[in-house]
Every structure is written in C-alpha cells, then in structure tokens.
Amino acid sequence: MHTDIDNSEKTSKQIWERPWGFKESILINLALLIAGFVLEFVLSEYKITLPGWPINLVIAIGLIVVFWISSRFLNKGITSFLSSVPAAVISISFVMFLVLLMAFIPQQRQEGWIQTWGLTHLKNSWPYLFSAIYLLAVLGHTIFKRLNKFNLKNIAFFLNHAGLWILIASASLGAADLKIFNMNLVLDRAIFMAEDENGTMQQLPFAIKLLEFDIEEYPPSLAIIDNESSKIVTKKGDKLFDVNAGSKFNWDAWQFEILQYISKAKYKDGQYESSSIMGATPAVEVKAVNVNSGTEKSGWISAGNFMYEKQLMPLDETLSLAMTIQSPKKFSSKLRIFKTVSEYQDAEIIVNKPIEAFGYKIYQVGYDEKMGKWSKMSAIQLIRDPWLPAVYTGIFMILAGSLYLALTGKSKTNKD
Amino acid sequence: MTWTSFPLYVYLTTALWIVGLLFLIFVKSKTYSWFAAVFLVLGVGGLACFTINLWISLDRPPFRTLGETRLWYSIFLSVIGIIIYYRWKIFWMLAYTLTLAVLFMFINIMSPETFDKTLMPALQSPWFIPHVVVYIIAYAFLAVSSLTALKGLVLMKKNMDYDPTLKLADNMVYLGFAFLTFGLLFGALWAKEAWGNYWTWDPKETWALLTWLVYLIYIHLRIRKKSNTTQALWILTFAFIVLLICWFGLNYLPAAQNSVHIYTS
C-alpha cells in the first residue's frame, strides 16, 4: 500500500532529510499540539465559534480543493509524506491523545490552570481543531493519491477513507448549523416559545399543543428488604416475587400468599380499594406465615407515590416485605402542531420514534417523574440538523467499506 | 427459567467441552475428530438453550446487564474457537477460547445477578440487538487477536517462525475491527433516533472511540512492511486492555455513572 515510499527511508538519514518518516511526523504533531495549547492559553477567554451556513460549506469545498491542488502540484516530498503510514499513524495517535485526555478529565467548567489550558473543553479547543484539520489533510492526500490508480480493488479503501473524511468534516463543520430546542409542554396549552442550548427563550415559527400524555408501566414486584438500608436482600439470581392474586412464594422460613392485587387503589381507613382517582397506587394484600415460629401476619403493601406513603410489611426487626417502584415501559405524547390557528397536523411521539415537522425532528425526552403516570407535563426536544445527510453518507460509506474488510480480511486488501 | 438454574448448564457445557478437547488430544485419527466436534457443538448448544430460555422468561433481549453480555461473549467466543479449529487446525486457539468462555461463565456463577424484566424505553429499539451483538462478536475476535499477538511475541523471542501467527493476528484484527466499526456506527444511528444526537461524548462513546483508534493505529502500522513488528504486537496486546476498560472498567468510573451505557446490576 505505502511501501513505495517506505523502502527508501534509510536509518542513517538526517532528521528533516527527505523522505520524512516517524521522527518528522512526531515532531510535526508535537509542534501542532504545543501550538494549540499555547493558543488556548493565550486566548483563553476567546471561545472558538465555527462559522455557519453557507461559510462552512465554502470551507468544506475549500479544504477539498486545497488538498487536491497540493496533492497534484505541491512538492512531491511533502505530499507523499502526507499520504504515508508514519503520517497516518501519528495523526491518529494525536487524536487519540486528545480523546484520552477527554476520557480522564471531566469536560465541564472548572477553575484554575485546567481551564486556562483548555483541558476542560477539549472538543472545542485549538489543539482539537488542529488535530482535526491535520487528520483531514492526511486523509485527503491519501485519498487523492489512491484516486490516481483507481480500480475496483481500491473501492473499499476509498469507501473507508473518504467516508471518514466526509463524516469528520460534516460533523465538525455542520455543528454550527445544529439547532436544539427544549420544550416542556403542558396539557392542552399551545406553546410557541422554546429554550435553546444557552437557556434563552426563542420563538418558534409554529406552536405545539400537548393533547395527551400516556405512560405504560411495568407491573410492580415484591421483595424482601433490609429495614435499615432499604436494600433488597432476596437472593440474587432469583426472580422478584410476582404480585398477581393467588401467587405463593417462599423465602427462608416465610411462606407468602397474595390475597388481592389492585393495580390502581386509593387508601382509606387502613384499607386499599379500587379507584381511578389521580394518585391511585398499586397495592397488594399479603398473608405471611413463618413455619418455624408459627407467626402469622397479613396486611397491605404499596410502593407509595406522590399521594400515598409507602406501606411495608415488617417480618421481624431486620426484614420487611416491600413493593418495588414501578418503572416506565413506554411513554408517549399526542401532539397538535400549529402552523397557523386553522392549519395544523397531529402526531404521536414515543422514545426512539421521533417525528418530523417543519424541518425539525421532534423527540420525546421525559415527563414529570415525581408525578409518574399522572404527569401533565411532557418534555420534548426539537432538533434541526441540516448536515445530517452528509454525516449519514459518511457513515454508510464506512459501513460498506467495513463489510468488505470483514469479508476479505487482510490478505486480499493488501496485495498491491 | 432464571439465573438459578445457570450453574447446571455451565457444568454440562464445561463437561462436554472437556470431553471434546480430550478427544482431540488423545485420539489422533482424523475420522474421530468429527466426533469431538459433536461434543463441542453440544456444549455451545447447552449455553444457547439457557440463553433462549432466559430471553423468553425475561420478555426482553438479555443484553442489559454485564452478566448477560458475558453470557453472549461465552457463546460467540466458543463458536469462533471451534470454527478456527476446524478451518485452520489451530488447537491452542480452541483450547484458549473455550477456557476463556468457561472463565466468563464461572464469573457469572460467582456473582449472580438479579433477575430483572424491566427495560427502559430508550433501550426498546430495533437497534438494541444488532448494536450489542456486533460489539460482542468484535470483542471475541479481538480477544483472539491479542492472544495471537502474545504468542507472536513469544515466538519472536525464541527466534522461531512467527509469520503465520502474525497473519492470523492481522486477520482477526480486520474481522474484529470491522465489527467494532459496525457497533460504533450502529450506536450512532440509534442514538440519533433516540436522543437526536449521533455523538454526545458519553464516557462509553469516548472509550469506544479510543478502542477503535488503537486498533486503527495497529492496522496502519502493519501495512508498512518495514515497521517494527514487536512494537505492533505490543500495541495489539495493549489494545485489549483499552477494550476491557471500555467494556467493564467503565462501570466503576465515577464520571460515567450517568451514562446510558452503564450496565444495571
């Protein structure tokens, strides 16, 4: 693949003597890294903002043109270096070094040197910008070099490398055109103001009304808990106990039987009864018998919610039988989206199933968790990402290229 | 079926595999090597049986907890080992993958997990299964590649021919890397549908990218014929450590506790 340039590299070569190899590559990247961090330190109060449409498109095309011209007409020594293995390996290592820093340093504002040197906002820093541009240059030169001898065998190579170029370039440059709005919809009210990423309220060109908010929950279970820590002590690997009426289960010397299960109940005078009022909670009536001591108890158990206290069944000083809090299985919102008062469309959004309206994708994000299934609020997010088709093009090119790699392995892709 | 019946399956599978391996060691005749295959495959079948039953009784794909991923890993790893043995006759690879699979199953027996049927809404997506499965396959291939790298280093030290070993390592990396790429990009496509962003620098994403980059470096180093082979092999061994941090280590990182990728326990 790159062997034509590698063969001529001599061990006795002076540094910066052509052709450049690993030493030069490392020095170039170190220089970029240091320059990046120094810039970050000097301009620490200046935040990098990438230009939006259409300047970002001009930049993307400009980069392609510059790399093409340079790969054709620039000094052969430099261009063949930029498409060599040492350039590739070290530029990837450069990116990896920055990602490694990101993995260990929390990326949020902190005071002190860690902030002034840009270590808390690496994805928006000069070193990151330099590494991205350098990586694009190396990728670009490698692609153009291979295009000269383009044949069927090189297709996988092209898909992987050009796909990555398109992915990095469009994801980075497109970020400036990304618009994200958050809205907390309240039942039956049309809202046209939304909060942007900086927390400022903005007016949307349309209004959204929440018609209905629905939530499905998993049935609750029963478990033995430790009175002090409230932690489940039921043996691991076992199922939690079902709440269905008639079911029986044992734990140590205890035998339990569910006498009644009410999925929606209200509490009244020490009893639970079926009800559909707001705040109704699941409740079970349980009989417990200890076969060793002969102790017998029965009573109600409930997980509790914003309306009702939780209700446990104490077995002894240390243990109790308790109901687990229900977790959501599915939640969805029915929306009416108004362009004008008379012109509107209805749609339903579910997690993992956003809808599209007026150039925005609308996502179901959350609800009032304290109110649970009685929530009258639905949190949604509106996202406009005009560069997405370009990002997806890159992603699908890489997927196709990887498929080829998986099918042929190294031996076939590497023969030339 | 719950995890309580798991040990039974593990003992059965382990016994079948041991019989298969002993067959291959002591019975040299070619005709009987297929007899061993029956035991090896039956062993995998036992595990698969447990997994399918678990899936049915959970009412959701068993991919949500670390233990559930270890279960899949054991299956894929053993399948890869068996295929490699019957395709290329590499016995040590078979022994290694089966041992590793048994080790992972015993970890599950030692630290059993709560049987939990719930699955948060964000995980209820057609992407869930392909995303996790391709990752587990990638991890299995890359585990094999790292061991091959270690063997290469030993052979090199002994001044023995390490070329075929290197070729095997490269092929495992190419396969594993392709699946790693699928996993990463499937994750991005899924995230866009679920949260509206294909990349959010979630700690798991950061570590997955790091893993991908290390293997990318190895692949590029190996393209160059005169590259330092020892160095490349050490990188390949080290790469697996990054992978393991991404897979297990993250659960213990305080910074990662809000990640959607933390396995529940």
Image (spheres, coloured by chain):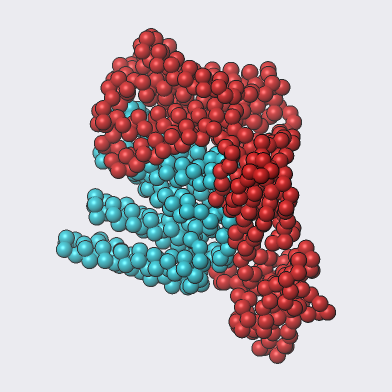
Chain colours: A red, B cyan
* Numbered label tally: 0
What residue occupies the far bottom of the structure in this picture? A294
Q: Position of residue A182 (x, y in %)?
A: 68, 42
What residue do we see at 51% from left, 46% from top?
B190
Establish if A288 lies above or below A391: below
Q: Position of residue A193 (x, y in %)?
A: 72, 39
* Relative depth, front residue between B165 and B242: B242
Q: Quadrant of residue A174?
A: top right
- Screen quadrant of the N terminus of chain A: top left
Would you say residue B85 is visible in this rendering?
yes
What residue occupies the far front of the structure in this picture? A342
Q: Position of residue B188 (x, y in %)?
A: 50, 42
Establish if B45 lies above or below B197: below
* Relative depth, front residue between A300 and A2: A300
What residue do we see at 34% from left, 57% from top?
B79
Q: Is residue A330 left or right of residue A93?
A: right
Establish if A172 lies above or below A308: above
- Screen quadrant of the C terminus of chain A: top left
Q: Is residue A255 left or right of residue B161?
A: right
* Relative depth, front residue between B143 and A388: A388
Establish if B26 lies above or below B244: below
Would you say residue A22 is visible in this rendering?
no
What residue do we see at 74% from left, 34% from top?
A200
Q: Quadrant of residue A6?
A: top left
* Relative depth, front residue between A194 and B207: A194
Q: Position of residue B205 (x, y in %)?
A: 54, 42
